[in-house]
Image (cartoon, grey):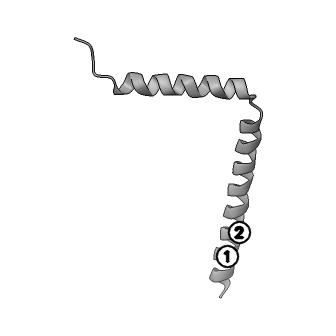
Amino acid sequence: MRAWKLLGLAGILAGVATGAAVARDERVRRHYDAGEIRERLHKRHDEALAREAPPAG
């Protein structure tokens, strides 16, 4: 019975840690203004297109 309690406690702690990490990432993400987000998305899009393009030659 004690093993089940420890397993349950470990699950709860893992959930709390995951929630804290998600909250931290959300705070970082919200810190950007619209212009910065737009620039980053355009840059990522251009990089993705460059990876997909066949080599010239």
Whether residue 17 is situated above or below residue 3 in the rendered picture: above
Q: Which mark is residue 12?
A: 2
Q: Which residue type carries mark 2?
A: Ile
Q: Quadrant of residue 9?
A: bottom right
Q: Quadrant of the C terminus?
A: top left
Residue 15 on image: x %, y %: 69, 63
Q: How would you rate the neighbour count of disc 1 (Cα within 10 Å): few for under 14, some for 14-19, many for 20 or more?
A: few
Q: Residue furthest left?
A: 57
Seen at 67% across and 62% down, the residue is: 14
Seen at 46% across and 23% down, the residue is: 47
Q: Quadrant of the N terminus?
A: bottom right
Seen at 56% across and 24% down, the residue is: 42
Whether residue 3 is situated above or below residue 22 in the rendered picture: below
Q: Quadrant of residue 30?
A: top right
Left or right for 27, reference 47: right
Q: Which residue type carries mark 1?
A: Gly
> In this view of the protein, which residue sits in the foreground, 46 or 4?
46
Q: Quadrant of residue 11?
A: bottom right
Left or right for 39, reference 52: right
Q: Are marks 2 and 1 in contact (CB under 8 Å)?
A: yes
Task: For marks 2 and 1, give the CA distance.
Answer: 6 Å
Whether residue 57 is situated above or below residue 25 in the rendered picture: above
Helix, strand or loop under label 1? helix
**Disc 1 designates what residue?**
8
Helix, strand or loop under label 2? helix
Residue 18 on image: x %, y %: 68, 56
Q: Residue furthest top?
A: 57
